[in-house]
Every structure is written in C-alpha cells, then in structure tokens.
Image: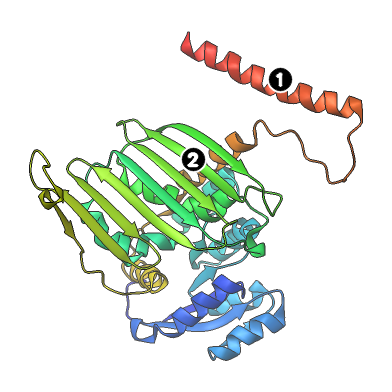
C-alpha cells in the first residue's frame, strides 16, 4: 500500500493496552489512519472503548477483519499466534504486542506467513520509540557495561507469563540493538512472589565482544522505576525511560584531577508519546512497503533469549504442587532426586564442553 488513502484500523483486545492503542489511533487522522472497530470477547468492554472513539464494537474477529486494512493485536500473549495467523491470512498488516508469541515455532510461523503474503509485521516493543532512547542512541558507542532496571507494581493481567516475557523482553530487545555483538553467556535468577511465574528476575548477559549487561525486571515493587546506565570509553550515558531524560558524562582530559575535568550534557529530548511514534512508524511502513523496526526477525531473537532465561531460572526448581499439604516422605525423596539429577546432568555437560 503506497497510496495516500486512509488506512482502516481495527484493534483486537479492549483491555488496558488495547484502550491505549484506540486512544492514540483516534488522534492520528492527519496521518491517514482511521479506527473502524474494536473487538473483544467481552462485548460490553469493546463497546466502552468503541463508544469513546466513535467506532464499532465487535465480539468476534471474523466480523471485524473484512472491514479493515491493518490490525493491532492487544490480546493476551497466548492468543498472539492464533490471532496473528488469522489476521495475516486475511491480508492484514499486523502490529502484535510483545512478545510476538509464546514459542519460537509460533514466532517463525508468523514471520514466514507475513513474508509470504508481503505484509508488514511489527512487534510492539514501544521502548524503542521512547524519545529518551532515540535521543541517547547517537551518543552510545561500544558500551562495555550496561545496567537496566525496570521495576513496577504487580499487574494481575500479566500473571499468566513470566516477568521476563512481560517486562524484561523490552530490555533484551534494546540490548540486541545497542550491542553489536552476539550474546555468549547468560546467568539468571528469578523468584515467584505474587503469581505462579517469576515476578522478579535478574540476568547477566555476556557478549562476544566482552561487553557485560546486568538487567533487573520486577513487578513486585511498590514504586515505578525504569532507567538504563551505559559505561563506555571516556563517557557514561544515563537514560530515564519514564521521565524521558538523558544525561551524558564525558571525560575531557586524559587524567581526571577533579570533577571540573568531567562535563555533563543534557541533550534536548523531543516530547512525544512512544506509542504515537510506534504507530506512526507502522503507518509509514505500510505506505512505503518498508520493513519495520523492530522486525519480526529481530523480535524472534529477543523471544529466544527470553525463553532461554526462563528455562535457566526454572531448571533447578523442585516441581510445585497446587495442594497445600506436607509432602509424603517418598514424594520429598523423589523431588530431591529429580533436582539432583538435573544438577548432575548440568555438571557433566559442562565437563564435556571443557574437554
């Protein structure tokens, strides 16, 4: 689609994220976008969002898809693959919220179908469009050590997936963009606090070029904090995601005698909502047949790393039981034996690799 005709949009999912997309799309008429309808199995919820933005509510995707050119999938993660395949089969340009899917095979299915149909498939890594990240990017040159913290309160909507897939995947995506080198090692730890999945996780990434990144994601915090620090030769870059601020500390002399030998810059950050920038990018890609950033291929790398992290965190977990009772002695022995076998297999594997 390269003409200037209006692009007809639909949204699948009328929850919190779907509501944000509806509100943003409703304000993009000057960009040639119009919101046709919102679909949710809960028709009353779809009606609430649709009435606010002068469009039509639907309870079944089959009723909405024939009337639109592009779609936003803001449904629960476990539905991304099914709905994404349905939308692409119907010839719709598709923006699917992160993560792209729950398995690598599902991600590959979506990517291949979009390529075969010559459709735009974009993944909702909205942090890439954060104005602070955009402004900081030109100053980031071969970082050697990176710390990222993404903390916030518990959200029951996302209790069905790990905090790694919920929050940390944003930062994994950023790392793959900012560090031009493959990940060679992962050290991960995590803990379930409020849900059946990890609600807090800390990961150390090692890269082939020697760079190291420490990333923490938590949905068990009572305060929100989202920031990134990057240390590189002769400079330190600080990015505040929430407040869209950037600080750059530069070494001005070979030897630092005092703080006077360090300059601090505050690059001007253009204030724009990341979601607006993301949707404008999606619209531009549709009109110009351009591959979006991030593309499906890039997001599949982020998903692959996220799944490896959750596997590492869960590898030594003793199986949980849904019954609140004291395990019988044989059950306890069996659980410990399984955990010991896993640790033994891991140790033997390391010895074989070293030899």
Identify the image's colour scheme: rainbow, by chain, secondary structure or one colour.
rainbow
Residue 81 screen position, x and y as percent: 60, 56
Residue 63 screen position, x and y as percent: 65, 78
* Residue occupying the point 90% across, 25% down: 330
Identify residue for label 1.
341
Residue sitting nearer the eye, 193 or 30 = 193
Residue 90 screen position, x and y as percent: 56, 67
Q: Say which element carries label 1.
A: helix
* Residue occupying the point 49% across, 63% down: 224
* Residue occupying the point 53% across, 61% down: 152
Q: 240 above or below 273?
A: above
Q: 328 above or below 24?
A: above
Crowd around label 1: few <14 · some 14–19 · many ≥20 (10 Å): few
Q: Say which element carries label 2.
A: strand
Residue 56 screen position, x and y as percent: 60, 87
Q: How far apart are marks 1 and 2 (CA)?
A: 24 Å
Residue sitting nearer the eye, 90 or 146 = 146
Q: 56 above or below 317?
A: below
Give the side of residue 112 with respect to residue 240, left or right: right
Which mark lies nearer to you, 1 or 2?
2
Crowd around label 2: few <14 · some 14–19 · many ≥20 (10 Å): some
> Which residue ends up furthest to the front in the rendered image?
258
Identify residue for label 2.
203
* Residue occupying the point 34% across, 86% down: 30
């Amino acid at each position: 689609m390269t003409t200037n005709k209006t692009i007809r949009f639909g949204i699948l999912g009328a929850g919190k994220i779907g509501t944000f997309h509806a509100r943003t799309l409703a304000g993009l008429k000057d960009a040639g976008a119009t919101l046709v309808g919102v679909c949710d199995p809960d028709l009353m919820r779809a009606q609430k969002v649709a009435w606010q933005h002068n469009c039509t509510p639907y309870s079944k995707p089959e009723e909405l898809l024939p009337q639109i050119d592009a779609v936003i999938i803001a449904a629960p993660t476990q539905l991304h693959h099914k709905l994404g395949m349905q939308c692409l089969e119907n010839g719709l340009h598709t923006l699917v919220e992160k993560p792209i899917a729950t398995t690598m095979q599902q991600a590959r299915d979506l990517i291949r179908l979009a390529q075969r149909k010559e459709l735009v498939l974009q993944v909702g890594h909205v942090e890439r469009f954060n104005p602070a990240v955009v402004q900081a990017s030109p100053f980031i040159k071969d970082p050697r050590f990176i710390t990222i913290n993404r903390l916030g309160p518990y959200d029951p909507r996302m209790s069905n997936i790990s905090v790694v897939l919920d929050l940390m995947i944003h930062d994994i995506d950023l790392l793959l963009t900012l560090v031009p080198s493959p990940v060679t090692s992962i050290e991960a730890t995590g803990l379930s606090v409020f849900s059946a999945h990890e609600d807090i996780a800390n990961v150390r990434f090692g890269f082939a070029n020697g760079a190291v990144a420490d990333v923490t994601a938590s949905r068990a915090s009572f305060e929100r904090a989202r920031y990134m620090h990057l240390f590189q030769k002769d400079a330190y870059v600080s990015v505040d995601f929430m407040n869209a601020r950037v600080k750059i500390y530069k070494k001005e002399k070979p030897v630092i005698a005092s703080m006077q030998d360090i300059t601090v810059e505050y690059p001007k950050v253009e204030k724009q909502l990341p979601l607006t920038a993301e949707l404008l990018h999606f619209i531009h890609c549709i009109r110009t047949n351009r591959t979006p950033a991030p593309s499906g291929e890039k997001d599949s790398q982020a998903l692959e790393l996220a799944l490896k992290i959750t596997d590492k965190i869960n590898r030594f977990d003793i199986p949980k039981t849904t019954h609140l009772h004291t395990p019988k002695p044989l059950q306890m022995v069996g659980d410990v034996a399984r955990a010991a076998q896993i640790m033994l297999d891991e140790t033997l594997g390391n010895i074989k690799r070293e030899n």
